[in-house]
Image (cartoon, rainbow, N blue to C red):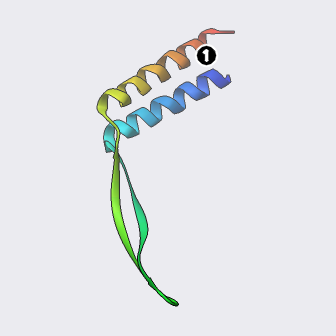
Amino acid sequence: MKATMIVGIALMVLGIVALGLGGFTYTEKESVVQLGPLEVTAQEKKKFPISPAAAGVMIAGGLVLAVVGASRR
């Protein structure tokens, strides 16, 4: 398989996953209090949303790249 086709398939898979999950979450640690050797931290969960429109663009772009990669011989 050609590199263009592989990138296109990967982009389509990422778009489908983004469409299904709607984004991803991550945990951020923050130092709240630091007193000598003691340190108090807080963990906060944050979400990074991915819009369905962006996921659709990734799927469409991946499809175009896969077709272009397959047609060039």
Image position of 35 with respect to 68: above or below? below
Q: Quadrant of residue 35?
A: bottom left
Kindly tell me whether residue 17 is visible in this rendering. Answer: yes
| Towards the viewer: 44 or 2 | 44
Image coordinates of residue 66 in percent, x first then y, are 54, 19
Disc 1: which residue:
69
Q: Quadrant of the C terminus?
A: top right
Q: Residue farthest to the front?
A: 35
Secondary element type, mark 1? helix
**Which residue is at a point 50% across and 90% down the rendered structure image?**
36
Q: Quadrant of residue 4?
A: top right
| Towards the viewer: 23 or 48 | 48
Kindly tell me whether residue 39 is visible in this rendering. Answer: no
Amino acid type, label 1: Gly
Q: Residue farthest to the bottom?
A: 37
**Which residue is at a point 34% across and 62% down the rendered structure image?**
45
Image position of 66 with respect to 6: above or below? above
Image coordinates of residue 53 in percent, x first then y, are 31, 27
Image coordinates of residue 13 in percent, x first then y, are 46, 34
Q: How many numbered marks, from 0 up?
A: 1
| Towards the viewer: 11 or 43 | 43
Left or right: 31 with respect to 70? left
**Which residue is at a point 57% across and 12% down the rendered structure image?**
68
Q: Quadrant of the N terminus?
A: top right
Q: Residues within 10 Å of mark 1 (few under 14, many from 20)?
A: some
Image position of 35 with respect to 6: above or below? below
Image coordinates of residue 22 in percent, x first then y, are 31, 42
